[in-house]
Image (tube, rainbow, N blue to C red):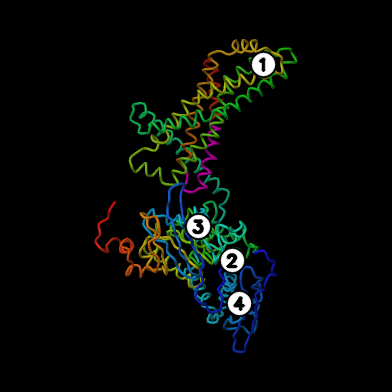
């Protein structure tokens, strides 16, 4: 539940802590020794080249895949050693925007947003309808309640997916490649929306992306996953990393390969 | 959470001052989980005389808030707008103000009301008729394309992968054996039972062999195998091609200049046309075995006696009639499955609809063509 308190915030607490995480598919190692912290209210970007395991890391964070080793902590509580009930309660605090929206195609937009509300709250149908209109209005889709996902554009589907992700007022929002498949302007508007929602809801946001424009526009902090060494090779604010990262790979990524004239090997 | 806490209540108090200001005091937790006051009080306050000119908020005692407060405020803003009362959002927390601004940034879409109206009966009949004729035209076009594809196949110019064909042959043939065995054995048993009850009254038990033999080879073997394949393979074809349509895989084939008919439909049709007669023969055998089991176990007939009677009863013509039917059914099941798959819309719900439709179309085609071929065989004396 996104509860904004009127009390002045002290130093932001660690909301998500990843501890010595190893990810494997069978025998194949995707990434190992991942340890980082996402603080409350920040926008945290998971970046890296294609195929480095960004989306896989996201799937580990949101509880779809069990880590081969290590753990993910939410507000200091372990996710993977928690009892099933407690784990489900943690998952209810997440909102996830999947890469293509992942709206249920046989339901209207209103039904898509209403489903989690109907499952997890004891609100009346009228209250749910009000909340649904509010969430759709927040993403600029007021009046589209009765449309099916197949009747709207890709960018709208993504925003509708965001409305569904926000249905239960989550305090952590996960975005998987939010700008994939969007034109530069729509993608920029979505970035603005993410910033606006973070500021007004006080939610913590984790974004998987390799879009440099997005990274510099929204990220407070970031982790860089490397496909070759199969581990994280940098953490920090993208601007700092751009200027001060000792690792040429990170600088090359952040400058679209134009940093130090190194030749690509492949 | 495991502790049972009493549901907290959100607080609302209205104060009217002399200069036409309606002050709304919000206190306590304003969350979706808390008990929140309904909008009636605020509606009464706004409709009261003397009419307020301005609504302002005092949120100093507000503890926590979420969407529950936002929906309430939206209601207040709508009602105030209706009464022509100005709303002053200054007293609200900053986050609330920004979210309200965001929610009203894009105006409500207006042109959606009319599109959802239920059309009249006449309009629905008209749309239905147009849709049926379009469907029929699409089916004819598909059959035409398949025929052209077959011609290309015969002259060896159809582009498909041999390995695909072999894989499909295996899927629709060998892998269907267990279910075909079970069903046709039981159909044999059922036929024998139905006959035995009647024939025993006349002491003519031995003719159960005739009944099962002719029934299985001419009719039930082909029919049961075809119905199984419609449910098993026709549905699988539709789901497979439908998903490929959703993922734009079929578009990718088309843009590469590879005909989806050649690449996807022909191997499937060929596989079923080849495998169905074999499955039918197998089903015939298993059905005869089922009949024999009943004959020996229930009617005290001997194995040799039953076998000899069966061999006398059925002729090559019966088997050929069954095999021709089986081949026809195979092609029809493949056509129904592939047609519905290719016609599939671009959503997961459409894949489900395509699969259902493939099975229904398949079974209807099987029964209709069975009736037709039975009449034709009778006319030509097969």
| Label 1 environment density (alpha carbons within 10 Å; few <14, some 14–19, many ≥20) | many
Residues marked 3 and 2, same chain: yes
- Give how far apart the Cα atoms at labels 4 and 1 are: 85 Å
Q: Position of residue B182 (x, y in %)?
A: 60, 27
The residue range painted magenta reads B344-365
- Closer to the observer: label 2 or label 4? 4
Q: Which residue is mark 2?
A: A130
Q: Are marks 4 and 3 in contact (CB under 8 Å)?
A: no
Q: Chain of mark 4?
A: B
- Give how far apart the Cα atoms at labels 3 and 2 are: 42 Å
Find out whether residue B352 is within the magenta segment: yes
Residues marked 2 and 4, same chain: no
Q: Which residue is mark 4?
A: B63
Q: Secondary structure at mark 1?
A: helix
- Give how far apart the Cα atoms at labels 1 and 2 are: 70 Å
| Label 2 environment density (alpha carbons within 10 Å; few <14, some 14–19, many ≥20) | some
Q: Which residue is mark 1?
A: B208
Front residue of B35 and B362:
B35
Residue at figure coordinates x 42%, y 57% from the top left? A54
Q: Position of residue B191 (x, y in %)?
A: 65, 22
Find out whether residue B287 is within the magenta segment: no
Q: Quadrant of residue B65?
A: bottom right
């Amino acid at each position: 539940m996104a509860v904004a308190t009127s009390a002045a915030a002290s130093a932001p607490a660690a909301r998500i802590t990843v501890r010595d995480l190893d990810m494997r598919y069978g025998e194949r190692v995707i990434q190992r020794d991942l340890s980082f912290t996402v603080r409350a209210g920040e926008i945290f970007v998971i970046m890296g080249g294609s195929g480095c395991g960004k989306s896989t890391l996201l799937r580990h964070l949101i509880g779809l895949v069990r880590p081969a080793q290590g753990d993910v902590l939410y507000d200091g509580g372990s996710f993977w050693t928690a009892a099933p009930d407690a784990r489900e309660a943690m998952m209810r605090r997440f909102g996830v925007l999947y890469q293509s929206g992942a709206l249920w195609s046989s339901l209207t937009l209103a039904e898509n947003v209403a489903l989690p509300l109907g499952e997890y709250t004891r609100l009346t149908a009228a209250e749910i309808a009000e909340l649904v209109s509010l969430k759709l209005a927040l993403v600029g889709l007021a009046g589209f309640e009765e449309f099916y996902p197949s009747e709207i554009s890709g960018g709208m589907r993504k925003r509708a997916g965001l409305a569904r992700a926000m249905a239960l007022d989550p305090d952590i929002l996960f975005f998987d490649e939010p700008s994939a498949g969007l034109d530069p302007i729509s993608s920029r508007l979505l970035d603005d929306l993410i910033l606006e929602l973070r500021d007004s809801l006080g939610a913590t946001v984790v974004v998987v992306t390799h879009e440099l424009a997005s990274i510099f526009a929204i990220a407070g902090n970031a982790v860089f996953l490397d496909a070759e060494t199969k581990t994280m090779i940098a953490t920090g604010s993208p601007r700092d990393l751009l200027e001060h990262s000792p690792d040429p790979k990170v600088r090359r990524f952040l400058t679209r390969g134009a940093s130090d004239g190194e030749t690509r090997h492949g | 959470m495991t502790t049972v806490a009493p549901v907290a209540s959100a607080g609302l108090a209205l104060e009217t001052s002399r200069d036409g200001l309606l002050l709304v005091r919000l206190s306590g937790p304003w969350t979706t989980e808390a008990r929140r006051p309904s909008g009636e009080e605020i509606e009464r306050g706004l409709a009261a005389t003397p009419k307020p000119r301005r609504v302002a908020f005092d949120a100093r005692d507000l503890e926590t808030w979420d969407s529950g407060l936002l929906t309430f405020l939206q209601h207040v803003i709508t009602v105030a707008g209706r009464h022509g009362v100005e709303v002053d959002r200054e007293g609200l927390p900053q986050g609330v103000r920004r979210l309200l601004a965001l929610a009203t940034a894009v105006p409500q879409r207006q042109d959606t009301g009319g599109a959802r109206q239920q059309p009249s009966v006449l309009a629905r009949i008209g749309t239905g008729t147009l849709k049926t004729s379009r469907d029929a035209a699409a089916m004819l076009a598909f059959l035409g394309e398949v025929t052209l594809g077959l011609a290309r196949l015969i002259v060896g110019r159809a582009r498909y992968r041999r390995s695909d064909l072999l894989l499909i042959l295996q899927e629709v043939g060998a892998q269907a054996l267990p279910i075909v065995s079970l069903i046709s054995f039981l159909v044999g048993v059922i036929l024998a039972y139905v006959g035995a009850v009647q024939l025993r009254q006349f002491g003519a038990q031995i003719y159960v062999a005739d009944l099962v033999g002719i029934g299985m080879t001419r009719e039930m073997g082909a029919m049961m195998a075809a119905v199984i394949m419609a449910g098993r393979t026709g549905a699988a074809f539709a789901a497979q091609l439908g998903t490929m349509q959703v993922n734009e895989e079929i578009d990718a084939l088309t843009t590469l200049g590879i005909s989806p008919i050649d690449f996807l439909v022909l191997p499937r049709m060929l596989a079923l046309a080849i495998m169905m007669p074999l499955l039918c023969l197998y089903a015939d055998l298993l059905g005869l075995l089922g009949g024999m089991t009943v004959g020996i176990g229930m009617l005290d007939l001997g194995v040799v006696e039953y076998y000899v009677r069966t061999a006398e009863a059925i002729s090559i013509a019966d088997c050929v009639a069954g095999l021709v039917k089986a081949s026809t059914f195979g092609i029809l099941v493949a056509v129904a499955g592939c047609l519905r798959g290719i016609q599939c819309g671009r959503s997961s719900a459409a894949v489900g609809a395509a699969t259902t439709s493939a099975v229904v179309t398949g079974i209807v085609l099987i029964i209709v063509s069975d009736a037709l071929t039975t009449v034709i065989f009778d006319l030509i004396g097969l």
